[in-house]
Image (cartoon, rainbow, N blue to C red):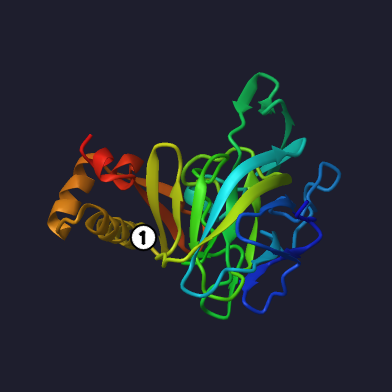
Amino acid sequence: MNKIAKDHVIYAMSSENKPVLNVHSGDRITFETMDCYSDEVTPDEPDRRCHRINPASGPAAIEEAMPGDTLKVTIEKISLGRRALVGSYPNSGTMKELVTRRMIHFLPVQERQLEFRSDLIVKADPMIGVIGVAPQEKEVGCGTPGEHGGNMDCRKIREGAVVYLPVFHPGALLALGDVHAVMGDGEVMGSGAEIAAEVTVKVEVLKQACEGPWVTDQDQLYALASAKTMEEALKRCCQKMNCQLQRQLGCTPEMAGMLMSLEGNSEICQVVNDLVTLRFGMPLVRFLSKEGNRS
């Protein structure tokens, strides 16, 4: 079994990171992950301050992956730990004027349900906050999203989803972490239900280029982009999707844009990191075949 233990972590994605596992295209890997606080905040030490956050387990090198390729990562299974935690932080998130104190709230997890209070149960919907490859530039912290992936906090990256990432360096150097038992779009308080987990993925190398991260689920294709503002991130998402539709449908930018206005959806991933992340989704059927495009 190809497995990366959670004591093999990085805090920045870089081509300088040495792989802890070498696999081939078509292989499966199980990543053991810490929570975003490096498993250091516990009920016994709820006020402990972490010096390093957002560890990503890995990296794994995929032998066939070369610069200019696309790494296809299928999320097959996310197994959750028994306890999650969610936090509130002064001067953070979208409610900084209302929040005056730091608070850590622990959530028991059982049978994919989280006990927020004894009278308030939240259904688990596990997703991966950090997933990426070595970036084109020298180093990017695991808490920062970008063209390489990283801390996109996209709740569509869940079981059954497929993530497409551009390869900038030999082996790609895939790492992931920051699993959430559940998180709403935006992550508006600055925290999801942070949890340790095991994630099993299948990796495949596609010998074609990829512009930044993409995600598919059963119904949608999502173009993801990160930027300083939501407006700029959305602009990048829409431009990516427009170009993809032009290639797929053999149409003009104007026709692609009109179809996007009819069938597309602009959605927020997260608004709490230094760079915000948005996604733009279109029906997957538009990209499957010419027959599907006539539906």
Q: Residue furthest top?
A: 119
Report helix, strand or loop for mark 1: helix
Please determine whether, in this image, residue 210 is positioned above or below residue 157.
Answer: below
For the point 51% across and 69% down, the residue is: 167
Q: Residue furthest right?
A: 44
Judge whether residue 195 can be spotted in this image.
yes
Image location (x, y in percent) of residue 140 = 57, 72
Please determine whether, in this image, residue 158 is positioned above or below residue 60.
Answer: above
Quarter of the image for the C terminus: give it: top left
**Which sits in the foreground, 204 or 182?**
204
**Which sits in the foreground, 200 or 6?**
200
**Mark 1 = which residue?**
233
**Amino acid type, residue under disc 1 in the picture:** Ala
**Which sits in the foreground, 24 or 73?**
24
Judge whether residue 96 can be spotted in this image.
no
**Which sits in the foreground, 27 or 157?**
27
Image location (x, y in percent) of residue 199 = 68, 46
